[in-house]
Image (spheres, rainbow, N blue to C red):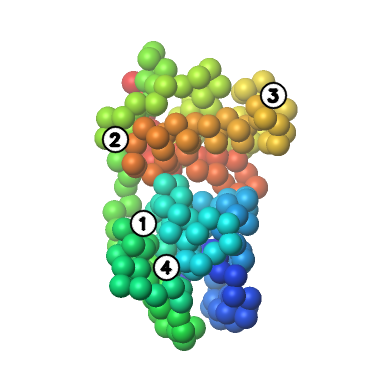
Amino acid sequence: MLPKTLALVDDDLEYTEFLSQSLQDRGVRVTVCPDSSELLATPGAFDFEFYVVDLNLPGIDGLELIKVLRRRSNAGLLVVSGHLGPQVYQQVVNAGADMYLAKPVLFEQVITAIEAVQRRAARGPVAELPWSLDTRARQLLAPDGATVDLSDMDMILMTCLLNAQGQPVTREFICNALGRVPDGDAPDGLNAIVFRLRRRIERATPIVAPLQSKPRVGYFFRAPLKAI
């Protein structure tokens, strides 16, 4: 069982070319990023079903990238790296990786490891713990009891997501509700509103922020959400 989408983050061009081709031959849509910054700048950077990450990366290093990904995603994450040392395995697992392979490694070994991690993820619990939107206190309540104060714009955004009940809400719909033009690059645009809200959620709780983007569509709340 292989994922449908995969981000391959590694600056070894020959390795990524052949591994990505092997995966694509098996029906996986692969996005190759030679450094961590390019991945994080990719639309839908946290929406891939799987990540294969090197540790020695330009930009932020692999360990920090794993931590960033784990704050936003529960996707399978495999580290394939020539970075050696007695503490490497423990470091990558503690950072949030599911498995570690040391280079040099055969492409078939990488693909087998991806399948193993993906099978384990597929057997995991499907249901997420519920979140609550307190409309009177204007707060988002996480399953662990953490609270996130919401601005006027946040409340409009969260109400759109609440009414959608887990389905994607288009950027146009949300922007119309906010009373602004869909111009994601503006300092006070929708992207900025979502980014700031995600950061507040991440600071309040270690639980992965369920506010996710749907590439070329908009946003959705991937955990159960109820109003109180």
Q: For the residues marked 3 and 4, what is the alpha-carbon distance in whole angstroms?
A: 40 Å
Kindly identify the residue that appears in the image at 56 percent across and 69 percent down.
Answer: 10
Residue 114's place in the image compared with 219, above or below, is below
The location of residue 177, given as percent across then percent down, is 61, 23
Residue position for label 1: 95
The location of residue 80, given as percent across then percent down, is 45, 73
Residue position for label 2: 143
The location of residue 132, given as percent across then percent down, is 35, 28
The location of residue 15, given as percent across then percent down, is 57, 79
Element assignment for label 4: strand
Q: Nearer the viewer, residue 150 or 199?
A: 199
Kindly identify the residue that appears in the image at 50 percent across and 40 percent down.
Answer: 220
Classed neighbour count for the residue bearing mark 2: other residues with Cα under 10 Å, few (<14), some (14–19), many (≥20): some
Which amino acid type corresponds to the residue marked 3 in the rendered image? Answer: Arg
Single out the residue that lies furthest toward the front: 85
CB-based contact (under 8 Å), mark 2 and mark 1: no
Disc number for residue 180: 3
Residue position for label 4: 78
Which amino acid type corresponds to the residue marked 4 in the rendered image? Answer: Leu
